[in-house]
Amino acid sequence: MKSRAFGRLRGLLIWFAAAASFTCSGGGGTGPSDKPVVNAGSNASVMVGTPYTLSASFSDTAGQGPWSYQVNWGDGNQSTGTKSSTGTISATHTYGQKGDYNVGVVVTNSDGQSGDGSLTVTVAAPDPVILAAGDIGDCDRTSDEATGALLDTIPGTVMPLGDNAYVSGTPTEYATCYDPAWGRVKNRTRPVPGNHDYYNPGPSKNADGYFGYFGAAAGPDKKGYYDFTLGSWFIIVLNTGTENGDSIKAGSAQEQWLRAELASHSQQCTLALWHHPQFTTVTGRPFIRPETTPLFQALYDGGVDLLLNGHDHTYQRFAPMRADGTADAAFGVRQITVGTGGGEGLYGFGPTTPNLEVRAGNGEDPTFGVLKLTLHESSYDWKFIPAPGLGSFTDSGTGNCHGRPS
């Protein structure tokens, strides 16, 4: 009897101890850990510079309010606040760089118990844009100012394609002719030298106005050729502005540099820019410019997708071609001439060629304007934008990037 009585007493003591432990836990909350339950929401995507708004929620069965919360945005920034009732947490943040960010949300009740949740925000950068035209600054015209006004409304990298300040590219002409027209976007400009930029008086003719105005943006050592990456694209600027055939012939320092750069880059897509077009249908000029053929051949061999030029005061778009002017849809280089920046007048045309796709100039849709080039990961879009009141011609399309020919 004593043994059974002792067993019953022992069982009652265990029951009372468990009950005391339950009633004195002091937290409430949701679940065995007595914590708020946090739902941070679904994974999201947003563009760089665009505000992202988090919409999280939480619950707490014990109602131990008020609740404090902290949002860790994953880039070193935090947002904090308090809630007087369970429900939704809303907070907004803007990311400055692309990447995948782990966002954590922590909610703490008045009893000091915390719950957390997380999600991933993928931040993408917008595809880069290039705005290009050549033959621009002219103190005797206002059309250059009209094309420059287009740049105010379109974000992107501005690339003047040479002959940027008429007539001789002097420092004074850059200050008084180019700067009022396109100088407003100097801080996002990467220039190309043209022949008029080398016409400055004096025996040196060394484009002092050009290099003095653009500074480091014009490339190192006043060579006039340089390269850089933009998004997923490789961009190459070359210098034909000296009009010295020896500087661009096969085996020249510039041509060897070009081939070495093309051989070493890893980007799928490549854009090249120089002043004088390889192909033209302007009246009085040969279809192929022999001086630039070594450079164009290097582009073809290196798998370059697109070439932009100025010099001819027209807009001309050609199908992808080899250096000899024959079509090559698989590996050819597409050339677009955009000599429509507003300087001097537009040129007229001679006969068309089989690989010419579209053209506009004196006598055929005369229009001043700029080319907007959007660079996607493996393709590009082009759009010619006319300056208001200076013609109505437009052109647009899409091209795909290709690799090097075997």
Image (spheres, rainbow, N blue to C red):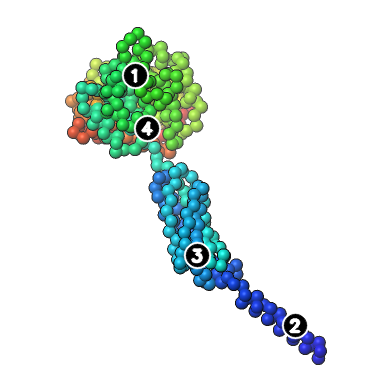
- In what quadrant of the picture does the N terminus appear? bottom right
Viewer can see residue 281: no
Whichever of labels 1 and 3 marks the residue nearer the N terminus, that label is 3
Measured Cα–Cα span from mark 3 to mark 2:
42 Å
Q: Are marks 1 and 2 in contact (CB under 8 Å)?
A: no
List the residue tagged with mark 4. Answer: 188
Viewer can see residue 94: yes
Residue type highlighted by circle 3: Trp
Of the two numbered discs 1 and 3 in the rendering, the one whose residue sits closer to the viewer: 3
Whichever of labels 1 and 2 marks the residue nearer the N terminus, that label is 2
Left-right relation of 126 to 30? left
- State which quadrant residue 172 falls in: top left
List the residue tagged with mark 2. Answer: 10
Q: Nearer the viewer, residue 298 or 233?
A: 233
Q: Are marks 4 and 3 in contact (CB under 8 Å)?
A: no
Measured Cα–Cα span from mark 4 to mark 3:
47 Å
Q: Are marks 4 and 2 in contact (CB under 8 Å)?
A: no
Q: Are marks 1 and 3 in contact (CB under 8 Å)?
A: no
Rate crowding at label 4 as few (under 14), some (14 to 19) or many (20 or more) other CA atoms within 10 Å. some
Residue at the bottom extreme, as displayed: 1
Whichever of labels 3 and 2 marks the residue nearer the N terminus, that label is 2
Which residue is at a point 18% across and 25% down the rendered structure image? 363
Whichever of labels 1 and 4 marks the residue nearer the N terminus, that label is 4
Secondary structure beneath dot 3 equals strand
Left-right relation of 296 to 34? left
